[in-house]
Amino acid sequence: MSENPDPVIADLAVQPRVLLVDDDEVTLMLTAAALRDRGFEVVEAGSGELALELLRERPTDVLVLDAVMPGRDGFDVCRALRATEGLEYLPILMLTGLDDNESITRAFEAGASDFFAKSQQWSLLAGRLHYLLRAARTRQELERSKAKLARAQDLARMGSFDWRRGTAVVRSTFVLSPEGLRVFGMAPSAAVTLRQLLRMVPAAERHGMMRILRDVMNTASVLTTDVPVTVRDGRQRIVHAEAEPEFNEAGHCIGYTGIVQDVTDRRIAEDRIRHLANFDALTGLPNRRQLIWRAERALEAARRIGHHVALLMIDVDRFKVINDTLGHAAGDDLLVEVARRLRSCVRHSDQVMEGALESIGSRSHRTLEAVGRLGGDEFVALLPEVSGEHDAERVAQRMLESMRAPIFVGGQECFVTGSVGIAMYPRDGNSVADLLRNADVAMYSVKSGGRNALALYTAHLSGRGREKLELESALHKAIERNELVLHYQPKIDVRSARMVGVEALMRWQRGGTLVPPGDFIPLAEETGLIVPLSEWAVREAARQAKVWQVSFGFADSVAVNLPNRLFERSDLVEHIHQAVSAYGVPHRAIQLEITETGLMRDLQNVIPSLHRLNEIGVEISIDDFGTGYSSLAYLTTLPISEVKIDRSFVRDLGITPQSSAVVTAIIALARSLGLRVIAEGVENLRQMEVLHRLGCGVMQGFLFSRAIPPDELEQWLKTTVLPRRAPWIGQANALEASETQRRLSPGAVA
Amino acid sequence: MNPFDSTPGQLTNLGHQDVAALDDAALARLSELDPDGRTGLVERVLSTYAASLDRLMAELRAARVAGQSDVVRRVAHTLKSSSASVGATVFASLCAQVEAATREPQSGAVEPLLDALQAETVRVLRAVHVRLAA
């Protein structure tokens, strides 16, 4: 029997430790032997006193205790242990006489776990001990799991409660777990009534809370609510309460069990997330999403009630310049200040009375009024109820004025202005998207009209905007579709009545019409399409030079207009080199024209290109000369070959004396710098005569020829210049003759 | 037969000299706890028993003279279980009867039972010594 290990014992990882207490040595000896034989580790004690001492010294799994002993008997020891911390739940098996009913009862009362009638049935005793040990383990696990739950609840700031409905004879009861008490800032041992808890809810919310509780109880439904409370130490917390009804056999609700949880932190986090999602982090203003939401609510209210809504699009003028020169931090500071000022121009509310928005007749849609930031330097004001566009204009005017006062950022005073576009519901759109777009169109019309003003949207503006958009997309395709062409205007040396070069001018063959450069070049500049357009022009000019070289021995240069940004590109020289090489013409076949304004705008970046171009033989001509503010100091050092007198001076020649003074000055300047001079826009013989007299012999203009397609130019040369048939040729000859005569006459003054 | 099942009514029969003072079957069960006799358990138990019997019977006699019936009852209780353990079944049965009788002192059963117990003590001790000497 002892050879075969008991399966129960084999199952145990460790040897259970038994403390055996009996005053009778024989029983002690035998029982110990029997239990050791069955796998227990046994410690023997001959008296209750010794047992208590041993229990204090060493951990024990189970106590086998003789009931009747001299001195401290089993009952006494049992009671003592139950009152000792850590031993309250020690499994105690009380050994009694077989028919000793009295001892059995007393053992139970003393707190023994079980009893065993003394006998020689050792296996029975061992089995009983195993049952006891298992029960103790189960109990321990339960205790541990309870402790874990309590800890988890504590961490989650959660506690449980139990409420029993009162009856005619029994008062209602309310029990809140220690963790629950902590939620309300109370000691774990505190006693609290439901009434006391409700008194912690601020008076303003208490009535609502009471109503919810009454409703839930009356319908025996589930309770789920968040309620603010002022806990014992005065802190404001938000407690989430959730409870389910309990029913008796008859189906009557007898009470509720549930949990309370401190959700303050979660609520704060949720509020923070909501704020981040709806408000601009930099300025604290409503962001695009929030603004659109408000605008939609405002339109709903306006539809219902029938009033006007205004959307104002506000943009800080030249913000990019401020940002680039003062730095992003200063730019941000500026935006914050602008935001503050714009906000003060409306009845801005951060909070919207959401619940009240739906109610008929309510004016709560007015709480939607706000200034928001769409991003960058773009702001939007929503005026949810205006009597008409004058209201909106007044607000816009206020905003423009508010922005004018200097703003101190980045260590200096900044003067900013804004452009405001206004769109009105329902006149300018029925949806938020339409209104935003149209306010934007109006705002851009202010920008292009010189900024620092306001504009109301009109359908006319939108039409222009759409046209522009279509034009832009068509221009993108123009190059690949070969819709671009170059027309050429000859440059004439009137003394010899010869063509000395041509200027290439771009035309866009769009469908059946020829689009003049003034209609698409500015757009090309704006969109950056000017770069591929110009590169194409250089290639095409080189190709044409080759064609003419072959057909009639053309050896002059084709002047191509380039915007200054092209000169900033480091690959310009390489590009020109490739273009002329591809067609086998010399570098000087291409001449480049840059406007005086363009040149001076970005002189430092343009100069290196000019030098490199000059080195390879590409001549530079300054277009529109006299209209900009050339620095004479630079002009002397720039590698340029030619200046072109602006057409505005030519037009007034012989009409105003000032114009001939300017032309005279330009010619004198050019001459002293060793530059060629050429006059543009020559339309009649009188202009030609005056120019010639002032010393400018090279010209271009309608008098000679407008810009014409390349094959027509060849034709023009054949039919007009070579046969010397045009009226200006006769005039030129006459001029030449008189000039010669004057030079030869002794009294002539140059 | 379970010795604890005895009742006072069986007293005279159990005091019979024919019944062995130490029950062989009980002793056999005892030796099962130490099958090889390696630890000498049976011998240790029997000599411990003999010693405690000597000591406790002296205590009982003193209490009998002094009229301390509760001491008498406790000693009887203690001897009852240890005696049953070593197979002194008659003695154990007498102890049980003494224990019960002390709860009803007016029955007058205690004195004759204590006499019988005294007589049985001699028999048990003799049997134990015989066994130990073997």
Image (cartoon, rainbow, N blue to C red):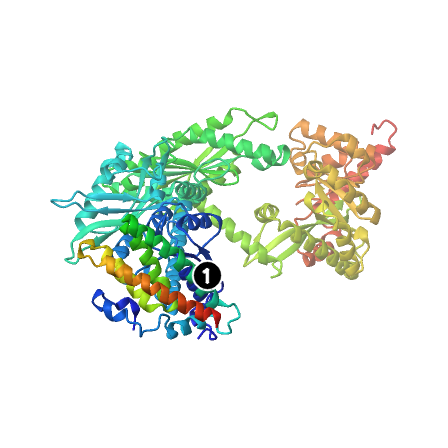
Q: Which chain contains the residue that carries disc 1?
A: A
Mark 1 lies on a secondary structure that is loop
**Amino acid marked by disc 1:** Pro
Q: Is residue A546 above or below residue A123?
A: above
Residue B11 lies, in percent from the top left, at 24, 67
Can the viewer see residue A623?
yes
| Picture residue at 39% right of the left edge, 69% below the top | A123
* Horizontal arrangement in the rendering, residue A281 relative to residue A296 (left or right): right
Name the image quarter holding residue A735: top right
Instruction: Give the labeled residue for mark 1.
Output: A16
Q: Is residue A445 left or right of residue B11?
A: right
Which quadrant of the view contains residue B115? bottom left
Q: Position of residue A131 (x, y in %)?
A: 37, 64
The N terminus of chain A lies in which quarter of the figure? bottom left
Q: A544 or A124: which is nearer to us?
A: A124
Q: Nearer the viewer, residue A653 or A592?
A: A592
A117 lies left or right of A654? left
**Where's residue B45, x and y in %?**
45, 64
Within the image, what quadrant is residue A415 found in? top right
Q: Which of A49/B37 is in front?
A: B37
